[in-house]
Image (cartoon, rainbow, N blue to C red):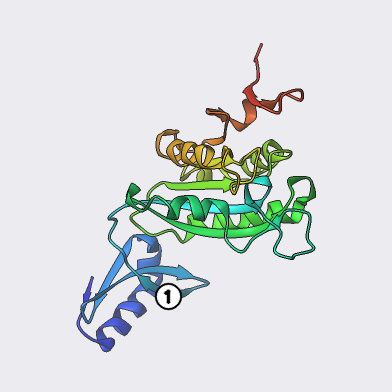
Amino acid sequence: VQCLDLAAYLRFAYLLRAPFFRSRFDFDAVVLTMSNVTYHVSSLSGGIVLSPYEDPKEDFVYVVTLGGTIDKDYPKLTSGYAFEFGDQSAAERILKAHPNLGISYKIKSICKKDSLEITSDDRRDLVSYIITTIKYRPIYLELLRIVVTHGTDTMIETAMYIKNSLSEEDRARVVIAFTGATKPERFVDSDASFNVGCAVAATSCCKPGSVVICMNGNVIPAEQCARVEATGRFVKRAIY
């Protein structure tokens, strides 16, 4: 849609709010150009929302962090003895270290907790963020790629919570990959970068609706994933 001035845009906005238009067109599929600037137009509570429209030049991944061992950092206080969560997530450091991958990303922190301390409220916040991101996604992203970094102890539980909380319609628009690390990303011998890379790749090749665990070099559907208590490794459960 081309609008040369504000008056033309106002007429266009009025048309968008008309019942005839709203019953026949998807608001998330409208692009408006006004004064040589292009906007993505969507509806919110009966109103009109304009956001800058970006042409897809790179693959895009949403990264959501909830803490866990992967994000643990060295103590900042001279008297400190325990690892703590830093200002920057491990996933952000890993992706920033590889600027030539051709992948754009957005980081969202839900919480910074050990996974045994994650509550139902934290999981509901994660679900809410995913649903909102699906609803107001840029129009050029038909399928959202979401990587969730999480502590290993309750990663499977959170993944299953997300899978069961999303509607079929919402799940069909997203691939979600959970990952973490057995050692903090700050450690030289950490598996963090390997696992994050695996999770990012998984979101590009898993079928829509997938919620998977990416650990130990494996990509396992959440509902088929188990953790071996003796080794801490994530494996695919035998199904009889």
User: In the rendered view, would you say 109 is above or below 232?
Assistant: below
Q: Which residue does the image show at 51% across and 45% down from the upper left?
A: 169
In depth, the one of 194 and 106 nearer the eye is 194
**Residue 221 place in picture, x, y as percent:** 57, 29
Residue placed furthest toward the front: 78
User: What amino acid is labelled 1 in the image?
Assistant: Ile
Q: Is residue 59 left or right of residue 207?
A: left
| Quadrant placement of the N terminus | bottom left
User: In the rendered view, would you say 135 is above or below 221?
Assistant: below
Q: Which residue does the image show at 62% across and 57% down from the upper left?
A: 128
Q: Secondary structure at mark 1?
A: strand
**Residue 182 place in picture, x, y as percent:** 66, 37
Can you tell which quarter of the image residue 75 is in? bottom right
Judging by the rendered image, the residue that carries numbered circle 1 is: 48
| Quadrant placement of the C terminus | top right
**Residue 166 place in picture, x, y as percent:** 60, 46
Q: Residues within 10 Å of mark 1 (few under 14, many from 20)?
A: some
Can you tell which quarter of the image residue 213 is in? top right
Can you tell which quarter of the image residue 214 is in? top right
Q: Is residue 148 visible?
A: yes
Q: Which residue does the image show at 75% across and 65% down from the upper left?
A: 78
In this rendering, the count of numbered labels is 1
User: In the rendered view, would you say 65 is above or below 239?
Assistant: below
Q: Is residue 149 left or right of residue 206?
A: right
Q: Is residue 153 left or right of residue 4?
A: right
**Residue 26 place in picture, x, y as percent:** 38, 59
